[in-house]
Amino acid sequence: MKEDLTIHTQTVFEQIKKFDNDTNEFWSARELGRILEYSQFRHFTPVIERAKEACNNSGIKISDHFEDVLTMVPIGSGAKREIDDVRLSRYGCYLIVQNADSSKEIVALGQTYFAVQTRLQEIQQMQVYQQLKTEGEKRIFLREEMSLHNKQLAEAARDAGVIEPIDYAIFQNHGYKGLYGGMAAKDIHARKGLKKSQQILDHMGSTELAANLFRATQTEEKLRREEIKGKDKANKTHFEVGAKVRKTIEDIGGTMPENLPVADSIKKLDKAPAPLKLRGE
């Protein structure tokens, strides 16, 4: 049954996506509520309100992601009537699934889907990223983002109880194992023909860096959001997030990260003249 549900929900969130006359994507809150297994819209409304509050607390304008609208629905014999609905952006959907009943498997799947897709959209919409023309420029940008978020992930892990260096190495390996189908850092080194002294992240292309960036950002958020405590629980969380990112790659027909080609050291690119200013320069 679980397998059938996973197969069924691979693209269900895309299936209910709509576009307005200006080709802007949006979702209907009523349709999303039904997908998330809320029997009545009035039971789903509190989830929307919590999502709006989270949006406001993040300093983001609510109306950019939650728009109250009227939707026409059939009532029989060809007649229709207007009902209240909310037009949602992708980020609005992301906030909703983060505030929905996470005990439901479909909600958990939605959390992974919208987290990954929203993060990808954020990167693509960054002004600096849009200016990047070459693979090398994208690698430098994503490697910098990876360095930043690894620091934030380390802080979140420390708050969860991962204190000693050896414990953090184990924690990191759990994330790699989830994303790379059971492969730890040493296994990835061997698979890609890297020396022990070579950093895995320095030899990733932009696609593989992006997958690892998703893993790091979503693990950090989950550790903080659910206030996870204890090394074992933190390790389990990192593995599960990595595995969910891997599943998303599989669902969209992408190449598994361990099968992506090894890139030349990014340090060689750092020595070349930078074509544009990146954050922090």
Image: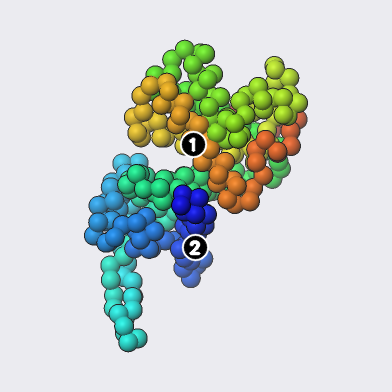
- Indicate which disc, 1 or 2, sits on the residue closer to the N terminus: 2
* Residue 243 rendering spot, x and y as whole percentages: 53, 38
Q: Quadrant of residue 69?
A: bottom left
Residue type at tag 1: Val
Q: Amino acid at mark 2?
A: Gln
Q: Secondary structure at mark 1?
A: helix
Count of marks placed on residues: 2
In this view, 177 is above or below 96: above
- Determine which quarter of the picture holds residue 261: top right
Does residue 8 appear to the left or right of 39 in the view shown?
right
Q: Which residue is mark 2?
A: 15
**Residue at x-position 54% and y-position 18%:** 169
Q: Residue at x 56, y 24 (%)?
A: 173
Q: CA distance from mark 1 to mark 2?
A: 24 Å
Query: For this view, does 36 lie left or right of residue 3?
Result: left
Q: Position of residue 123 (x, y in %)?
A: 54, 44
Considering depth in this image, is 22 or 189 the residue closer to the camera?
189
